[in-house]
Image (cartoon, grey):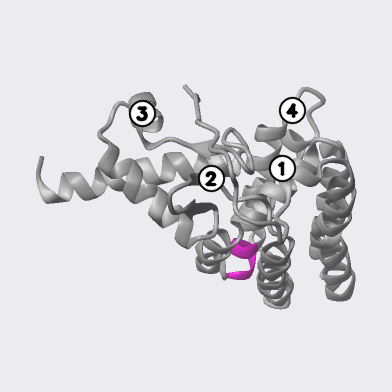
Amino acid sequence: MTESAKRSNRRVIYETLRRKVLTLELKPGEGLSEKDLAAALGVSRTPVREGLILLAEEGLVQVFPQIGSFVSRVDPQRVADAQFLRESVELTALEDVPADPDPHLLAELEDNLTRQRSPEIDVEEFFALDEEFHRGLLRLSGHERAWPTVVSAKGHLDRARRLGLESSPPQVYADQHVDILDAVRAHDLQRARTTMRTHLRAVFTDIEDLRTRKPHLFATTEATPVRRTITTWR
Protein backbone atom coordinates (compact mmCIF):
# COMPACT_ATOMS: atom_id res chain seq x y z
CA MET A 1 0.00 0.00 0.00
CA THR A 2 1.36 3.42 -0.93
CA GLU A 3 1.85 6.11 1.71
CA SER A 4 -1.01 8.09 0.16
CA ALA A 5 -3.31 5.06 0.39
CA LYS A 6 -2.30 4.50 4.01
CA ARG A 7 -3.17 8.11 4.89
CA SER A 8 -6.50 7.75 3.12
CA ASN A 9 -7.23 4.52 5.00
CA ARG A 10 -6.35 6.13 8.33
CA ARG A 11 -8.69 9.01 7.56
CA VAL A 12 -11.55 6.67 6.68
CA ILE A 13 -11.11 4.67 9.89
CA TYR A 14 -10.92 7.84 11.99
CA GLU A 15 -14.07 9.27 10.40
CA THR A 16 -15.89 5.95 10.83
CA LEU A 17 -15.00 5.76 14.52
CA ARG A 18 -15.84 9.44 15.05
CA ARG A 19 -19.24 8.97 13.45
CA LYS A 20 -19.98 5.98 15.67
CA VAL A 21 -19.07 8.02 18.75
CA LEU A 22 -21.15 11.03 17.71
CA THR A 23 -24.19 8.95 16.77
CA LEU A 24 -23.94 7.15 20.13
CA GLU A 25 -23.42 3.77 18.50
CA LEU A 26 -20.33 3.77 20.68
CA LYS A 27 -21.83 5.02 23.91
CA PRO A 28 -20.37 7.42 26.50
CA GLY A 29 -18.25 5.44 28.93
CA GLU A 30 -18.04 2.36 26.72
CA GLY A 31 -14.77 0.45 26.70
CA LEU A 32 -12.92 0.20 23.40
CA SER A 33 -10.89 -2.75 22.17
CA GLU A 34 -8.48 -2.04 19.31
CA LYS A 35 -8.58 -5.73 18.42
CA ASP A 36 -12.37 -5.93 18.26
CA LEU A 37 -12.73 -2.66 16.39
CA ALA A 38 -10.08 -3.68 13.87
CA ALA A 39 -11.81 -7.01 13.29
CA ALA A 40 -15.19 -5.34 12.85
CA LEU A 41 -13.76 -2.85 10.35
CA GLY A 42 -11.64 -5.42 8.54
CA VAL A 43 -8.36 -3.57 9.07
CA SER A 44 -5.19 -3.92 11.11
CA ARG A 45 -4.97 -2.46 14.60
CA THR A 46 -2.62 0.34 13.48
CA PRO A 47 -5.20 2.63 11.77
CA VAL A 48 -7.64 1.95 14.62
CA ARG A 49 -5.03 2.95 17.18
CA GLU A 50 -4.23 6.10 15.18
CA GLY A 51 -7.93 6.93 14.90
CA LEU A 52 -8.39 6.57 18.65
CA ILE A 53 -5.42 8.88 19.23
CA LEU A 54 -7.05 11.55 17.06
CA LEU A 55 -10.35 11.10 18.89
CA ALA A 56 -8.52 11.44 22.20
CA GLU A 57 -7.09 14.76 21.00
CA GLU A 58 -10.68 15.90 20.38
CA GLY A 59 -11.70 14.77 23.85
CA LEU A 60 -14.04 12.09 22.47
CA VAL A 61 -11.93 9.18 23.73
CA GLN A 62 -10.00 8.80 26.98
CA VAL A 63 -6.97 6.54 27.33
CA PHE A 64 -6.04 5.27 30.79
CA PRO A 65 -2.63 3.56 30.98
CA GLN A 66 -2.81 -0.05 32.18
CA ILE A 67 -6.61 0.14 32.10
CA GLY A 68 -7.77 0.81 28.54
CA SER A 69 -9.49 3.22 26.19
CA PHE A 70 -13.02 4.46 26.71
CA VAL A 71 -15.49 6.64 24.87
CA SER A 72 -15.48 9.91 26.79
CA ARG A 73 -18.57 10.77 28.72
CA VAL A 74 -20.30 13.96 27.63
CA ASP A 75 -18.51 16.92 29.18
CA PRO A 76 -20.92 19.81 29.92
CA GLN A 77 -18.04 22.32 29.87
CA ARG A 78 -16.99 21.19 26.39
CA VAL A 79 -20.63 21.41 25.35
CA ALA A 80 -20.76 25.00 26.63
CA ASP A 81 -17.52 25.92 24.85
CA ALA A 82 -18.74 24.49 21.54
CA GLN A 83 -22.10 26.19 22.01
CA PHE A 84 -20.34 29.52 22.56
CA LEU A 85 -18.43 29.11 19.29
CA ARG A 86 -21.46 28.00 17.34
CA GLU A 87 -23.68 30.76 18.65
CA SER A 88 -21.03 33.40 17.96
CA VAL A 89 -20.63 32.25 14.34
CA GLU A 90 -24.28 31.71 13.49
CA LEU A 91 -25.68 34.85 15.11
CA THR A 92 -22.99 37.03 13.56
CA ALA A 93 -23.58 35.45 10.15
CA LEU A 94 -27.25 36.43 10.26
CA GLU A 95 -26.18 40.06 10.07
CA ASP A 96 -24.78 39.43 6.59
CA VAL A 97 -27.85 37.82 5.04
CA PRO A 98 -28.79 40.18 2.20
CA ALA A 99 -32.10 42.00 2.18
CA ASP A 100 -33.03 39.97 -0.92
CA PRO A 101 -31.62 36.50 -0.23
CA ASP A 102 -30.81 34.14 -3.09
CA PRO A 103 -34.20 32.60 -4.04
CA HIS A 104 -32.61 29.27 -4.96
CA LEU A 105 -30.98 28.99 -1.53
CA LEU A 106 -34.25 29.93 0.14
CA ALA A 107 -36.02 27.22 -1.86
CA GLU A 108 -33.45 24.67 -0.67
CA LEU A 109 -34.07 25.71 2.94
CA GLU A 110 -37.84 25.47 2.48
CA ASP A 111 -37.46 21.97 1.03
CA ASN A 112 -35.28 21.05 3.99
CA LEU A 113 -37.96 22.23 6.41
CA THR A 114 -40.63 20.23 4.60
CA ARG A 115 -38.57 17.07 5.04
CA GLN A 116 -37.88 17.92 8.70
CA ARG A 117 -41.60 17.97 9.40
CA SER A 118 -42.28 14.52 7.98
CA PRO A 119 -44.14 12.49 10.66
CA GLU A 120 -42.05 9.41 9.78
CA ILE A 121 -38.67 11.07 10.32
CA ASP A 122 -36.23 9.36 12.68
CA VAL A 123 -33.56 10.95 14.88
CA GLU A 124 -30.64 10.47 12.50
CA GLU A 125 -32.58 11.73 9.49
CA PHE A 126 -33.66 14.80 11.44
CA PHE A 127 -30.16 15.41 12.75
CA ALA A 128 -28.73 15.37 9.21
CA LEU A 129 -31.39 17.80 8.01
CA ASP A 130 -30.80 20.01 11.07
CA GLU A 131 -27.10 20.20 10.21
CA GLU A 132 -27.83 21.01 6.58
CA PHE A 133 -30.34 23.70 7.58
CA HIS A 134 -27.81 25.55 9.71
CA ARG A 135 -25.13 25.15 7.07
CA GLY A 136 -27.63 26.50 4.54
CA LEU A 137 -28.18 29.61 6.63
CA LEU A 138 -24.42 30.21 6.64
CA ARG A 139 -24.43 29.73 2.86
CA LEU A 140 -27.20 32.31 2.63
CA SER A 141 -25.00 34.80 4.50
CA GLY A 142 -21.89 34.01 2.44
CA HIS A 143 -20.09 32.33 5.37
CA GLU A 144 -20.46 28.64 4.57
CA ARG A 145 -16.70 28.15 4.83
CA ALA A 146 -17.00 28.72 8.58
CA TRP A 147 -19.11 25.58 8.96
CA PRO A 148 -16.27 23.00 9.01
CA THR A 149 -14.67 24.92 11.88
CA VAL A 150 -17.91 24.74 13.84
CA VAL A 151 -18.35 21.03 13.07
CA SER A 152 -14.84 20.12 14.17
CA ALA A 153 -15.40 21.75 17.57
CA LYS A 154 -18.79 20.38 18.52
CA GLY A 155 -18.37 16.65 19.14
CA HIS A 156 -19.56 16.78 22.75
CA LEU A 157 -22.31 19.22 21.76
CA ASP A 158 -23.57 16.91 19.00
CA ARG A 159 -23.79 13.98 21.39
CA ALA A 160 -25.75 16.10 23.85
CA ARG A 161 -28.08 17.19 21.04
CA ARG A 162 -28.69 13.60 19.97
CA LEU A 163 -29.40 12.57 23.54
CA GLY A 164 -31.82 15.48 23.80
CA LEU A 165 -33.72 14.26 20.75
CA GLU A 166 -34.52 11.07 22.65
CA SER A 167 -36.83 13.04 24.94
CA SER A 168 -37.71 16.14 22.88
CA PRO A 169 -39.56 15.40 19.62
CA PRO A 170 -37.88 16.71 16.44
CA GLN A 171 -41.03 18.68 15.66
CA VAL A 172 -40.16 21.14 18.44
CA TYR A 173 -36.87 22.02 16.76
CA ALA A 174 -38.36 21.94 13.27
CA ASP A 175 -40.89 24.57 14.35
CA GLN A 176 -38.05 26.72 15.68
CA HIS A 177 -36.29 26.39 12.31
CA VAL A 178 -39.47 27.63 10.60
CA ASP A 179 -39.53 30.68 12.89
CA ILE A 180 -35.88 31.41 12.17
CA LEU A 181 -36.33 31.24 8.40
CA ASP A 182 -39.49 33.38 8.59
CA ALA A 183 -37.51 36.08 10.40
CA VAL A 184 -34.68 35.85 7.86
CA ARG A 185 -37.09 36.17 4.94
CA ALA A 186 -38.67 39.21 6.61
CA HIS A 187 -35.17 40.61 7.12
CA ASP A 188 -36.03 41.04 10.80
CA LEU A 189 -32.52 40.70 12.19
CA GLN A 190 -33.45 41.18 15.84
CA ARG A 191 -36.13 38.48 15.71
CA ALA A 192 -33.87 36.14 13.76
CA ARG A 193 -31.05 36.51 16.29
CA THR A 194 -33.34 36.13 19.30
CA THR A 195 -35.03 33.05 17.86
CA MET A 196 -31.72 31.50 16.84
CA ARG A 197 -30.20 32.12 20.28
CA THR A 198 -33.16 30.48 22.02
CA HIS A 199 -33.00 27.57 19.61
CA LEU A 200 -29.28 26.94 20.04
CA ARG A 201 -29.41 27.21 23.82
CA ALA A 202 -32.16 24.62 24.18
CA VAL A 203 -29.42 22.00 24.53
CA PHE A 204 -28.61 23.31 28.02
CA THR A 205 -32.12 22.49 29.26
CA ASP A 206 -31.79 19.04 27.69
CA ILE A 207 -28.48 18.47 29.49
CA GLU A 208 -29.89 19.35 32.91
CA ASP A 209 -32.75 16.93 32.37
CA LEU A 210 -30.46 14.18 31.07
CA ARG A 211 -27.95 14.57 33.92
CA THR A 212 -30.80 13.90 36.33
CA ARG A 213 -32.10 10.85 34.46
CA LYS A 214 -28.87 9.41 33.02
CA PRO A 215 -25.93 10.73 35.07
CA HIS A 216 -23.68 7.86 33.91
CA LEU A 217 -23.48 9.45 30.46
CA PHE A 218 -21.81 12.61 31.74
CA ALA A 219 -18.27 13.41 32.84
CA THR A 220 -17.58 13.69 36.57
CA THR A 221 -14.54 14.21 38.77
CA GLU A 222 -14.48 10.55 39.79
CA ALA A 223 -11.31 8.46 39.64
CA THR A 224 -10.28 6.56 36.53
CA PRO A 225 -12.15 3.35 35.67
CA VAL A 226 -11.16 0.26 37.61
CA ARG A 227 -12.63 -2.31 35.25
CA ARG A 228 -12.31 -2.48 31.49
CA THR A 229 -15.40 -3.09 29.38
CA ILE A 230 -14.61 -4.59 25.99
CA THR A 231 -16.44 -3.33 22.96
CA THR A 232 -18.23 -6.07 21.01
CA TRP A 233 -19.65 -3.74 18.35
CA ARG A 234 -20.14 -5.19 14.84
Name the mark nearer the viewer: 3 or 2.
2
Q: Earlier in the sequence, mark 3 or mark 2?
A: 3
Instruction: Tell me where the magenta segment starts and ends, as one range.
Output: 138-142
Q: Earlier in the sequence, mark 3 or mark 1?
A: 3
Residue at image coords 50%, 30%: 231
Around disc 1, counting alpha carbons within 10 Å, would you say few (fewer than 14), some (14 to 19), or many (20 or more)? many
Q: Earlier in the sequence, mark 2 or mark 1?
A: 2
Q: Tell me: 69 left or right of 2.
A: right
Q: Is residue 7 magenta?
A: no
Residue at image coords 73%, 57%: 220
Q: Which residue is mark 2?
A: 70
Residue at image coords 27%, 31%: 43
Question: Circle 3 — which element?
Answer: helix
Looking at the image, how many numbered discs can be counted on the residues?
4
Q: Earlier in the sequence, mark 4 or mark 2?
A: 2
Q: Which residue is mark 3?
A: 41
Q: Are marks 3 and 2 in contact (CB under 8 Å)?
A: no
Q: Tell me: 169 left or right of 89.
A: right
Looking at the rendered structure, the kind of residue marked 1 is Arg
Residue 110 seen from this side: no
Q: Which residue is mark 4?
A: 121
Residue furthest left in the image = 2
The part of the image, by quadrant, that contains residue 116 is: top right
The part of the image, by quadrant, that contains residue 102 is: bottom right
Number of the label disc, if any, that sits on residue 162: 1
Residue at image coords 70%, 57%: 222
Residue 27 seen from this side: yes
